[in-house]
Amino acid sequence: MQPQKTVRSVDDLAVRGAPPLFAEPLHVGRPNIGDHARFLLRAAAVLDSGWLSNNGPVAQEFERRIAEFLNVKHCVAMCNGTIALEIATRALDLKGEVIVPSYTFIATAHALQWQEITPIFADIDPTTHNLDPAAVWRMITPRTTGIIGVHLWGRASPVKELEAMAKEHNLRLMFDASHGFGCSLKGKPLGGFGECEVFSFHATKFFNTFEGGAVVTNNDALAEKMRLMRNFGFSGYDNVIYPGTNGKLTEIAAAMGLTNLENLDEFVAVNRRNYACYREAVASIHGLGLLVYDESERNNFQYIVLEVAPYFPVSRDRIIDVLHAENVLARRYFWPGCHNMQPYRSYYPHAGLVLPNTQVVAERVIVLPTGSSIGVEEIEGVMSVLRVLAAGGA
Ligand code: T4K
């Protein structure tokens, strides 16, 4: 989308009464959609088949392809990432307390709380935004049964350290890999670490199935248990052998997944280009930094994470207001941290005292738009606004 104006000074800003930079909103999380014709063919085949759900042939093919892509034995496809987290934590028999970061999407914590498991928030490393192993260690109590690491922004959790800690304390370890599809750690795809890993394929994710998710694992028994749980505990007609829920992925969602999988390389290429563009532009602005992806790994580059230094002339929240006025709907992910949301805020009103890095990072991050709907012109427009703010406020 062509910018509607040139921004050279504060007087050109929409917060000062000028028209917005973009006629339509630029979103964080606008879906990547693969080849429309391929999807419509698949959708027509689903309609013709009269098979819409319940582990149908398209969902089974989707699971095979995902398992192959991630180099894991099993993919158990689910209706969304949150249910996938709930089923995975139940299948692992987590109870009592489970250690998670507070700096994550609320679903990581809610998936536990929903099952009356207590999420215990551990602090993050302010440079990686991922769990700090020393902080995790400090939160272990006799009631702890597990750890959920989150590969935030698609950058791997400290897997090795968490594995060692889980082993030493006899804890179960799984990962919320909702951001990590198509990313790697030491060349190995995220998905193969811990006892299982959970993906979200929500519309806003770089790879989507409309709504959807999956748990992937190399453990045969665990996969079998999750398949039962996903389908009310049914083992054949009239035979329920387990308490279960409904976590099934529909055929149409799986058709979207198969189509998007075929276009994955293009999605990454666009995100990579956008990331490089933002990175170059941010590098020349004092007081702004861009979270860097390790180029020796595979990355999906789906989040453009900007960090605002305390000495930048404009506060993070004012930058958000200015960008929104320009129709750039930048986000404050994952402010204010799960511990500051309900019910956790009431349960642990002083949690912030042991989460200093979470508090600081949550106050300084802005996530900028990227994905297939964003190009070089849009990025140049966004950066022109940030350059004006850097030069003297708004
Ligand atoms: N764990 C982690 C670490 C996660 O990040 C997530 C989800 C989960 C677990 C749970 O997975 P799911 O159960 O969702 O599968 C969004 C997503 O809803 C959520 O899936 C995602 N994380 C989170 C990071 O972001 P919101 O509240 O920011 O989304 P929303 O509705 O504001 O959408 C963002 C923008 O995208 C909007 O400005 C409009 C645009 N959009 C959205 C949709 C749905 C579109 O253009 N088209 C669309 O179809 O949470």
Image: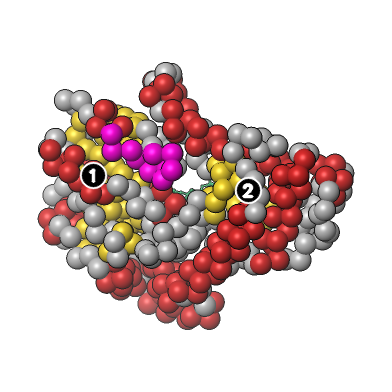
**Can you tell which mark lies on residue 330?**
2
Instruction: Describe residue 13's horizontal placement relative to residue 142 as left or right.
Output: right
Element under disc 1: helix
Q: Is residue 355 above or below residue 75?
A: above
Question: Where is residue 73, by image quadrant?
Answer: bottom left
**Can you tell which mark lies on residue 28?**
none
Is residue 263 part of the magenta span, yes or no? no
Q: Nearer the viewer, residue 277 or 63?
A: 277
Q: Position of residue 48 (x, y in %)?
A: 42, 78
**Can you tell which mark lies on residue 161?**
1
Identify the image quadrant of the C terminus: top right
Task: State the predominant SS element of the stretch in magenta.
Answer: loop
Do the residues under discs 1 and 2 have CB atoms within 8 angstroms?
no
Identify the image quadrant of the N terminus: bottom right
Q: Nearer the viewer, residue 115 or 283?
A: 283
Residue at x 27%, y 28% (from the top left corner): 139
Q: Amino acid at mark 2?
A: Ala
Q: Residue 40, can we see it?
A: no
Q: Position of residue 349 (x, y in %)?
A: 43, 18
Residue at x 56%, y 44% (from the top left corner): 307
Is residue 126 part of the magenta span, yes or no? yes
Nearer the camera: disc 1 or disc 2: 1
Q: Amino acid at mark 1?
A: Glu
Instruction: Describe residue 100's horizontal placement relative to residue 25 as left or right.
Output: left
Q: Which residues are magenta?
A: 125-134
Query: Disc 1 or 2, which lies upstream in sequence?
Result: 1
Instruction: Describe residue 254's horizontal placement relative to residue 276 as left or right.
Output: left
